[in-house]
Image (cartoon, helix red, strand yellow):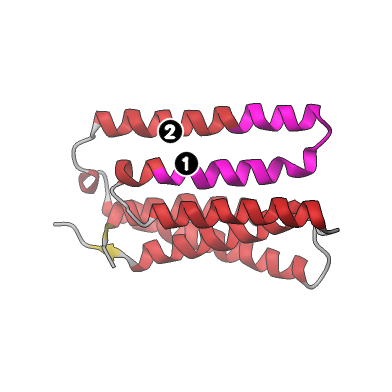
Amino acid sequence: MVGLPRRQAGLTALYLGVFAAVWFSVPKADPPLRSVLVVGSVVALLTAAVGAVLVARAGRRAAGERDRSADRRYGLVVAAEVGVGLIGALLLAAAGLTGYIPVLVCAVVGIHFVPLAPVLHDRLLVPLGVAVTLVALAGLVVGLVSGVSAGLVVGTGAGILLLAYAVLALFRTRRVA
């Protein structure tokens, strides 16, 4: 398993921990699943806090020189993600299909990890992106063929995947001199 610089591992745990907690809050669930989702949110936020501590301890020097080209590519990928997600959500809402907005957002989030992998020098973002996109597909199928809400599938699935990756990032930490 390839190690991540301490600061990058911390940022990964911080960001994905926060977003895992957000995804765990998407589904409306009855007990006992509701309790599991709350516990998942708490664990995700604790993971994010550990990531923040890693970032603070690594300091700005660990960040090294800024790669303006990578920053620009990162910004473009995130802007495209937000744009596609927003336009798609507005179209789904206009069509009266608001229950499928989490599916769209989950798919867009999954897809965005693929072009971010080379920008962030983290090839494991590709399988994460594929897995999150498959969760979106599963949510769509389950939402269409059963009484289970698509949001329950994607909120739980995306939350678990992002939390697992955030924790993995903490274990992939390597010291950079």
Query: Disc 2 and disc 1: Cα gap in Å?
Result: 7 Å
Q: Residue 59, percent across and down? A: 27, 49
Q: Nearer the viewer, residue 47 or 1?
A: 1
Residue at 79 percent of width and 51 percent of height: 144
Lateral position of residue 82 relative to residue 102, left or right = left
68 to 111, vertically: above or below: above
Q: Which residues are magenta?
A: 85-114
Lateral position of residue 34 relative to residue 160, left or right = right
Q: Secondary structure at mark 1?
A: helix
Residue at 63 percent of width and 51 percent of height: 136
73 to 152, vertically: above or below: above
Disc nearer the start of the sequence (2/1): 2
Lateral position of residue 175 relative to residue 98, left or right = left
Q: Using the rendered image of the protein, determine whether residue 26 is visible from the camera's viewpoint.
A: no
* Residue position for label 1: 112
Asked whether residue 42 is drawn in magenta, I would say no
User: Pointer 2 and pointer 1: residues touching (CB < 8 Å)?
Assistant: yes
Farthest residue in the bottom direction? 32
Q: Amino acid at mark 2?
A: Val
* Residue position for label 2: 77
Q: Using the rendered image of the protein, determine whether residue 133 is visible from the camera's viewpoint.
A: yes
Residue at 72 percent of width and 27 percent of height: 91
Q: Residue 75, percent across and down? A: 40, 30
Q: Residue 88, percent across and down? A: 66, 31
Q: Nearer the viewer, residue 26 or 100?
A: 100
On-image quarter of the C terminus? bottom left
Q: Crowding near pointer 2: few (<14 within 10 Å), some, many (20+)? A: some
* Snapshot quadrant of residue 51: bottom left
